[in-house]
Image: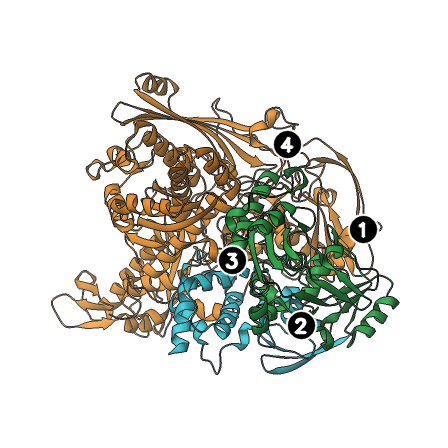
Chain colours: A orange, B cyan, C green
Amino acid sequence: MPDGNIGQPVKRREDQRFLTGKGRYTDDIHRQGELHAYFLRSPHAHAAIKSIDTSAAKGEGVVAIFTGADMAADKVGSLPCGWTVTDRNGQPHKAPPHFPLARDKARYVGDHVAMVIATSYAAAKDAAERIEVDYDVLPANTNTAKFAKAPELHAEAPGNLCYDWVLGDEAAIKQAFAGAAHVTKLDLVNNRLIPNAMEPRAAIAEYDSGTGEYTLWSTSQNPHLLRLILCAFVLGIPETKLRVIAPDVGGGFGSKIFAYAEETACVWASKKLDRPVRWTGDRSEAFLADAHGRDHVTHVELAMDKDGKFLGLKVDTVAAMGAYLSSFATCVPTYLYATLLAGQYTTPVIYCNVKAVFTNTAPVDAYRGAGRPEATYLLERIVEVAAREMKMDPAELRRKNFIQPSQYPYQTPVALVYDTGNYEASLDAALAMIDYKGFPARKAASKAKGKLRGIGFSSYIEACGIAPSAVVGSLGAGVGLWESAQVRFNATGTVSVLTGSHAHGQGHETTFAQLVADQLGIPYENVDVVHGDTGRIPMAMGTYGSRSLAVGGSAIVRACNKVIEKGKKIAAHLLEASVDDIEFKNGAFTVAGTDKSKTMAEVAFTAYVPHKYPADLEPGLDETAFYDPLNFTYPAGTHIAEVEIDPDTGVTTIADWVAVDDFGNVINPMIVEGQVHGGIAQGIGQALLENCVYDQESGQLTTGSYMDYCMPRADDLPSFKVGLTTTACTHNPLGVKGCGEAGAIAAPPALINAITDALGVMHMEMPASSEKVWRAAQAAK
Amino acid sequence: MPTVSMTVNGQQVSREVEGRTLLVQFLRDQLNLTGTHVGCDTSQCGACVVHLDGKSVKSCTVLAAQANGAKVTTIEGLAKNGELHPVQAAFKEHHGLQCGFCTPGMVMSAVDLLQHNKSPTEHEIREWLEGNICRCTGYHNIVKAIDHAAKQMGS
Amino acid sequence: MYDFTYHRPGSVGDAAAALGKAGDGKLMAGGMTLIPTLKQRLANPSDLIDLGGIAELKGIKEEGGALVIGAMTTHAEVAASALVKGKIAALAALADGIGDPQVRNRGTIGGSIANNDPAADYPAACLGLGATIKTNKRSIAADAFFKGMFETALEDGEIVTAVSFPVPSKAGYAKFPNPASRYAIVGVFVAKTGSGVRAAVTGAGPCVFRDKAIEDALTGSWSADAVKGSSASAGSLNSDIHASSDYRAHLIGVMAKRAVQAAG
């Protein structure tokens, strides 16, 4: 089979540069005359800024010091939140201003108070230490559950409430619960996480006073979206005058979707000073000021009949927004969360109330999975607890409630329509892979060694391929969530694919080249993929929500189809046949029923050397397409974790991990497996190791470095057993669903279910630290 | 400012540095060897690992002045005559990298492991990687790549 | 990092002289703690005196029944030393578990004990084995060396030159690492020495300490089963987001048992 075909584990072409040190990340780029920015950050969780005295800070190497007042004088706007959530009373969410540099108050430790620009980073940092800020320190609250009685962060948001939102029918849920034979209840916290892409955020902004054009190099997952936000809402620059380039980006996981204060300030300052301004965050700043993830406090109840059939699910959640609204913060605990509460089950009635609240913490926004891990965690936890209370096998209780293959399209009670799936297939495959029948013997063997063994399931679903513009528009999104692609033949037969889907680890340069080679019947080597530059790529929406292949790839298919249609016209001319008689197959245009044929390369060549074209045949072979999905895609599957616990220390060892996922069709299985591995590791991180902790008294970030924030390392994790089942997505041309977030969504409940199973307890909050596990093991003795 | 001289990837270099200049800053900012990365400020992530006189070190926790007179190898110096080192090749073959940011340090660390231990077990590989954090791969394919590289180099 | 003047003396005498002349000088051994501290701007020395160029501070030898390890010997060198493995295998194993491989390639025994981080490993070995710390001025018994959190008996201008470990008949070390930093939450070093059984605990309190309950139990019977718990009251132990003092108190007992098992 030729290298590059769909379904083949083609080795990544990106790897050559990354493996030899030739990757080009933002901080690797330098501009002539560049200056270095450093941000003075608030040391207080909540403080009025009475005055800022920069006089002592000016000195050697310091070029400028800017504060919120300077930005206000220039009419720099607030960083917007791009999704308006309508609360239960029909009112839009409270949207207090979020200025790049604080103006009146600092609202979390790490909030941006001043920007120092100097000829070296060290000089900027030295100068920042000499700035005297007179703070009036105010009482602060970092505790999500305590929002109501906490000091008010914003006058615009009384009671620190951003919105109080509801999905579902309150009367119907009451009725469902009234008829229940058994109700399972659970209180749980979805712990706050810090994304920790390995490349810290960075930006370089350059202004050309000759043309009035700006260029911003940024660690962004979506340069066009960043351009849109900066131009339309914050800086008032025409979109034609700002080029945003996201070069190689070292991981994102959501945290690099958003428009941040630092890059905004660099763009603004680059014109003010008419010099390039660069900023590279260090890891400590990333901990303080990258958008964090999760942070929900939830009460959930599941109503069942006597046989364990689910009758209703009721969820009450308080979700932290942090001190300000980040770019998409509002939609994460609503439309990406409550809409997933049906999971894989036929639960007929679901009711969800979400209160989004402000706390004196870093802003919270989408982090790998975004809303869907929170939904999956509570659902798969309460199903597990229900099985234990009902004394049913947890796998069988799930099976009993699965939506059946015959039921698609399946309208859930929480707005989504699942197009396809087969949940029993993935459950059964996972049970076989982990040897579920052999578990009692393995548990006995562990017991003989003085160890506790447990097994835990997670049958998850996610809504990916984000998102149909009509749907999200009706729900308050300020943008459409289509994607663009341009497929451009060059005269020599090579193809440049310009995609709006930015890659920061996902291997698009390989997968998309496989896709285009297959669509156009040309050698894989002849296809080049270009991404991450608003100066080269049509308007685009970027990478998040496992959308790159389902939406970006579909746009590429559509552009390829346009190329083929155009090619048919050219071939008809070259072959002196009617367009209607031209067939395209395996890279060649053939007159139907004859052996008269032209290859794609021949057609492309004449497109640029159109010496004998008729007047009505347009030269060139270069097509652009936009694709707006018709529905979300619904990847789903079952993960099973098996753990062994040392009751003397509380240390949990992951003995085995099985993941069986249905991502629809797969283009590069090697890359898909890699995405699954990484997602599982982040999910295990959340469940076992990672926890963002703010000091309840001072509001300081306790876990402000890798000394205290526990990143998963190689020796914390097992090798994973990964399998696939396939039901093709019915509504996109590739039948694909997306694989980027599955592991992070599926893993946390599987692991907590396994740990609580081993310990014989109903619940344990994440992360299941060794001390918590030890205490539970002692209590169980 | 003191002058430091060292051999970097086989080339003799000499530059003026401040006392506080870190080896990683010297490599990145003065020699433009930007393959060596900085991913944290507490000497834990390992994105900056290079070889100093043949041993893996975190170049963010070594002063340039401490490397005076030493031999330094960075990721840029690992491939010979355009041919990837077996560890680099194995990372590509087994998809041991995604975003690529931790990769240079990860590879340099793995090369050092295989200098010490020609046939490490999976457990030994995982333990050795304590000082290298990857957020993308879940380490699964990194471990696999190093295992295969060891076998390749041993055969 | 604030700037400083860097010095790289070739002898202990030159190092002491450079330190004496400096306004606010600081000695640097491997730099594995000091450089991160400087990067965080938590220290601002005028002069940094790098001990890395002093040959006389390096090396491992046997001297009068004791193992003498030069202050600038790295953890990796101790871990790999056939001599250390042969005489005090627990010490080689301890060195092999400090930090990560890159830290072990740079970090030194002298730097570790002079810093006396409450969660470092080497102080437990020194105290547990009844080592003698040799400086450019005198010899100090480990029992008198570790004074408190980041505090030692070292005086201004005093430079650790070597550590002398009497060879025990049995020794073992077990560590429960902090899952984030990988420093010890609790580390226990036990040894059967010519001067009796010794047990030292690191990570659990503000400074490494000897645990009398464990020593008494193991003096009675050198076996894991003999260990019943720590003499430290939970109230005297550290408590943080990773481990409460109760949990640390419990772990001292568990690690002591495992250290005895490791000692064989």
Element carrying mark 1 = loop
Label 3 chain ID? C
Q: Is residue C179 visible?
A: no
Q: Which mark is residue A130?
A: 1
In this rendering, position of residue C215 left or right of residue A686? right
Amino acid on which the number 4 mark rests in the picture = Asn
Element carrying mark 4 = loop
Amino acid on which the number 3 mark rests in the picture = Ala
Residue A417 percent coordinates (x, y): 30, 36
Where does the N terminus of chain A fall, quadrant-wise? bottom left
Label 4 chain ID? A
Q: Quadrant of residue A678?
A: bottom left
Element carrying mark 3 = helix
In this rendering, position of residue A609 left or right of residue A270? left
Instruction: State the CA–CA distance, disc 2 to disc 4.
Output: 45 Å
Comparing labels 3 and 1, the label whose residue is closer to the camera = 3
Element carrying mark 2 = helix
Which residue in the structure is indicated by mark 4? A141
Q: Which mark is residue B30?
A: 2
Q: Which mark is residue C262?
A: 3
